[in-house]
Amino acid sequence: MPKYEIIHGEAFPLVRYQLNQGEKIKAESDAMVAMSATIDVTGGAEGGLFKSLARKLAGEKFFFQYLEAKRGPGMALLGHAQPGGITDVELDGSYGLVVQKDGFLAATEGVEISTTMQSLSKGLFSREGFFILKITGRGVVFVSSYGAIHALDVEPGQQVIVDNGHLVAWPDYMNYTIEKASNGWINSWMSGESLVCRFTGPGTVLIQTRNPSSFVGWLQRLGIVPKKI
């Protein structure tokens, strides 16, 4: 039996993780949906106050939850708040994974969740802010999205342009720049795209099929959500 599987498709998935006795995984606060009676769940601010505050600035929750199979093997079901996908990324320790706000769901032992600071231009225009989440170490990390997750495999020297509202995660060795979607600001504004991210391969960029900001804008146009003043 595999250690884990992602069930219930791309719209409302869950991670079903099988823990051996003494094994522990960590997840974002409130990720646990159900678990065996052999598992204990606790909370904590991993890395101390300053690292937890930095993760908060990067759009994540201050606390993690820890699920440990203390009284024998057991199963944990993990989910996230958004209607969207979950995918797994296995890290071998040779690189880190950069993840969008609210993109981290859970990770196995040996995986460290930290933050790094972006440049001034990327912090202002990438929609991710100045602090971004960086995941390193060895193990499996589960990332979540709004909409389904699609992997863009970029060959060495190849470039791909992604609307910055659709980014989920990318390896930290990939270079990217932020630029106008069109040749001029007026064309960019009229196209509805404005700023985009240009990635250069090699590497795999994970994108989400829906844009949260566009969804909010749609609700505002329908009058369901009031427009910001």
Image: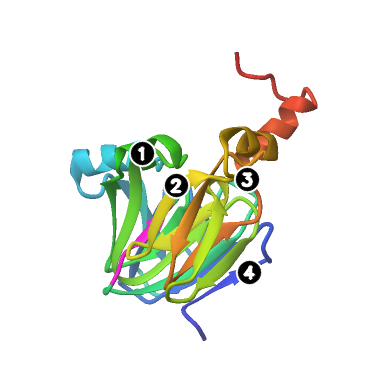
Q: Amino acid at mark 4?
A: Ile
Does the CB distance between marks 4 and 3 fall below 8 Å? Answer: no
Q: Is label 1 in a helix, a strand or a loop?
A: helix
Is disc 2 surrounded by few (<14), some (14 to 19) or many (20+) residues within 10 Å? some
Q: Amino acid at mark 1?
A: Ser
Residue under label 3: 211
Is disc 4 surrounded by few (<14), some (14 to 19) or many (20+) residues within 10 Å? few
Q: In the image, is residue 98 part of the stretch drawn in magenta? A: yes
Residue under label 2: 178
Write down the quadrant of residue 219 in the picture: top right
Which mark is in front, 4 or 3? Answer: 3
Q: CA distance from mark 2 to mark 1?
A: 8 Å
> Of callouts 4 and 3, which one flags the residue occurring earlier in the amino acid sequence?
4
The magenta span reads 95-99
Main secondary structure type of the part rendered in magenta: strand
Q: Is label 3 in a helix, a strand or a loop?
A: loop
Q: Residue furthest right?
A: 222
Q: Is label 4 in a helix, a strand or a loop?
A: strand
